[in-house]
Image (cartoon, grey):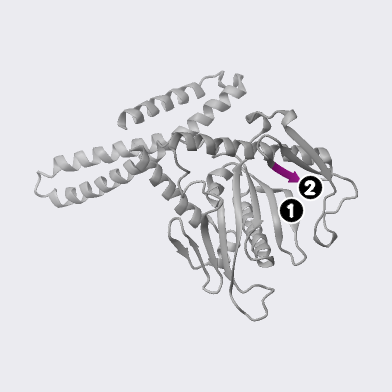
Amino acid sequence: MLEKLQAVAGRYEELCARSEQPDFYADPQKAAAVLREKNELEPVVDAYHAYLGALREMEDAQELMSDPEMRDFCQETYRGAKAHSEELYRRLQILLLPKDPNDEKSVIVEIRGGVGGEESALFAHSLFRMYSMYAARKGWSIELMNYNDTELGGVKEADFVINGRGAWSRMKYESGVHRVQRVPETESGGRVHTSTATVAVLPEMETVDVELNPADIEMQVYRSSGAGGQHINKTSSAVRLIHKPSGIVVACQEERSQLQNREKCMRMLASKLYEREQERLDSEVTGMRRSQVGTGMRNERIRTYNFPQGRVTDHRVGLTLYKIDAVMDGDLDEIIDALATADQAEKLKNSQ
């Protein structure tokens, strides 16, 4: 690992030298690429230099231990530097793990009501609100693609884009079955019901990232609709695309023009085809499905929201938080941090 770190430090110094050249910004595109790589390497190099500093501190303390008057102080210094070096070594191992190439991308999120009738639709709406509030906390924006609501304010299905740098790096852990335990608004007897909703998260791909043959795509147009007369258009502006070879169907009705809805559908279709191809490649390479922590599988129960007890439990890492109101208001970082840490630990174990 130290050889690899030396190579990274050398590359970083090279990039720093290039960025200081007088004509560095003559080619803005190349300059941006150099600065991007330099910024990516900087945390690794900083940790590496701190690690070398901790090793030197250990050596200096060890040399001075022969002096009886300095022994106690040096032993304490040595123990502190040793603990720091071990922590930095673990951090460097994680920093050197291969990066997910999609981490900086925006994401497409699909929420569907599951088991539980109208209550599942109401829970799906709660999840849509939760992710919208989380996006706002991160400074990301929400772009609706397809939103079908119910008479009571629930959501049959909601498809939307979360636009923001690094959205995939955080949101990729949310795919799976979410379970809620609460007294539904439709329940007059005060009994707790269990319902579910499914969430799928895809990195948003541009159509140029995926090979799409126009002859393979069937386009249908229809009038957009919603509960209580909402979102209704008199023209057929809503678009549905069917990818005939795979059977994938995508739809968008939130824009006023057919052209805009079709453009959004193409982005969604590209993302779904990319996901399917990645799953096929993963299956061929590993001979097994993706790990439970990681991007998740849609049919796995990943999290339970228990309102009577005020707790949220993520079953993949065994984390339980007693702050359900804050979580439903978009306070998801503690859960996502735990999932990201577990994912890194799993990758680290597999790389050794």
Quadrant showing the N terminus:
top left
Q: Which mark is residue 61?
A: none
Residue 212 in view: yes
**Residue lying at the far right of the rendered structure:** 234
Q: Magenta stretch containing residue 44, yes or no?
A: no
Nearest the viewer among 53 and 4 is 4
Rendering coords of residue 289 (x, y %): 47, 43
Rendering coords of residue 264 (x, y %): 73, 40
Q: Main secondary structure of the magenta part?
A: strand
Residue 20 in view: no
Q: Residues within 10 Å of mark 1 (few under 14, many from 20)?
A: many
Q: Which mark is residue 147?
A: 1
Quadrant showing the C terminus:
top left
Q: Which residue is mark 2?
A: 253
Question: Residue at point 70% right, 36% down?
Answer: 244
Nearest the viewer among 276 and 344 is 276
> What span is colored magenta in the figure?
249-254
Q: Is residue 26 left or right of residue 9?
A: right
Mark 2 and mark 1: Cα distance apart in space: 8 Å
Question: Residue at point 61% right, 19% down?
Answer: 26
Q: Residues within 10 Å of mark 2 (few under 14, many from 20)?
A: many
Rendering coords of residue 348 (x, y %): 37, 42
Question: Residue at point 84% right, 44% down?
Answer: 237
Label 1 element class:
strand
Rendering coords of residue 310 (x, y %): 53, 71
Q: Is residue 70 left or right of residue 125?
A: left
Q: Is residue 198 above or below residue 279?
A: below
The reply to whether the C-beta atoms of the residues labelled 2 and 1 are less than 8 Å apart is yes
**Residue lying at the far bottom of the rendered structure:** 189
- The picture quadrant where one finds residue 262 is top right
Q: Amino acid at mark 2?
A: Gln
Q: Amino acid at mark 1?
A: Tyr
